[in-house]
Each structure stands twice: as structure tokens, then as C-alpha cells.
Image (spheres, rainbow, N blue to C red):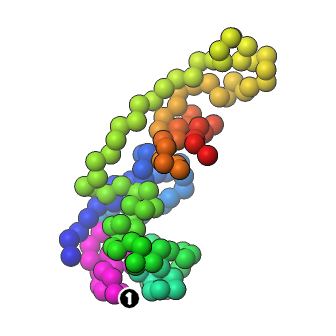
Amino acid sequence: YPTFEVTGQAGSNFNRIGAPVAMLGMYEFDKMYNGAAAYTNYKYIVFYGGARDGWQWVTGYNFWAGYGPALSEIADAQGFIKSMQFQLGTDEVKDYPTFEVTGQAGSNFNRIGAPVAMLGMYEFDKMYNGAAAYTNYKYIVFYG
């Protein structure tokens, strides 16, 4: 069972969205658990919790993070990690360019009540509903 590295969450916004940095790092095979290979970075464990619980990514086998996908939907730990929008060290990550919002067309930005906080540099946040979402750390632009 090959080791793999979790390098971040899609969009390089790992710390902003509250996912613990302890989830990053090298994962190695721990044991077979409920018919699937379980992996650990010695802080977190990715394992299949069985038909009722599905895939889990938690700090111990006796913890539960909610109903994860079934083994028939996602075949392995790496697939589950990627489904959670995390990047593996082997992933090719697309470079999404930043852009700057400088004002509203017609120069009436402040007159119509749009906050100045909407101005500024926007950078890629994450993939959301199949499209790139961007943030300036105050506002988020996404496809709903």
C-alpha cells in the first residue's frame, strides 16, 4: 500500500476555511478496516467506517465525522480525500489568476450603496458547484 501526501485544500485556502493543518502531511498504510485500506499521518486517520458510516477522516477509529460516502461510491482513501477538495502531492493543480475589482461601471460605486469592501484583489478560493470561487477575504464570488 503506497504512502501519499496531502498537501492542502483546493485553492490554497487551507487555513482560512478552518480545516486543521494537522490533516496535511504524509499518510501511510495503517491497517485494513471494514474491507478498505486505512491510512494515517499519526494525527488523523482516513478509514472506511462500514456501510452505515461510510468514509471518515478523524483523529481516531472511535470518532465519527458524519455519514461519509459508501465504498461503492469512492473506492479508496485517496479518492475520499480528493472528494473533500483536498490536494494530493501527485495532483496537478491548475493556477487560477488573481484579479482586481477597482470600481463599478459608470463610477457610481458608492452612490448605489455597494460597499467599498467589495473592491480589491480577489484570489482563487476553491471549486464550488463546478466553478472557481474567488475571495478578497471580505466577499466571495461564486456560482450558486
Prevailing secondary structure of the magenta residues: strand
x, y (%) of residue 143? Answer: 57, 42
x, y (%) of residue 95? Answer: 35, 37
- Foreground pick, 102 / 63: 102
Q: Is residue 40 left or right of residue 9?
A: left
At horizontal 63% and vertical 37% (from top left) the residue drawn is 139
Q: Residue furthest top?
A: 106
x, y (%) of residue 67? Answer: 55, 76
Which residue is label 1 attached to?
A: 34
Q: Is residue 71 magenta?
A: no
Camera sees residue 120: yes
In the figure, residue 85 lies in which quadrant?
bottom left
Q: Residue furthest left?
A: 2
Please name the amino acid that badge 1 sits on.
Asn
- Foreground pick, 58 / 128: 128
* Whether residue 53 is situated above or below residue 21 in the rendered picture: below
Q: Is residue 44 magenta?
A: yes
Part of the protein shown in magenta = 27-47
At horizontal 34% and vertical 74% (from top left) the residue drawn is 75
* Circle 1 residues within 10 Å: few <14, some 14–19, many ≥20: some
* Whether residue 76 is situated above or below residue 33 in the rendered picture: above
Q: How many marks?
A: 1
In the figure, residue 48 lies in which quadrant?
bottom left
Camera sees residue 21: no
- Foreground pick, 68 / 22: 68
* Whether residue 85 is situated above or below residue 111 in the rendered picture: below
At horizontal 43% and vertical 62% (from top left) the residue drawn is 83
* Whether residue 61 is situated above or below residue 141 in the rendered picture: below
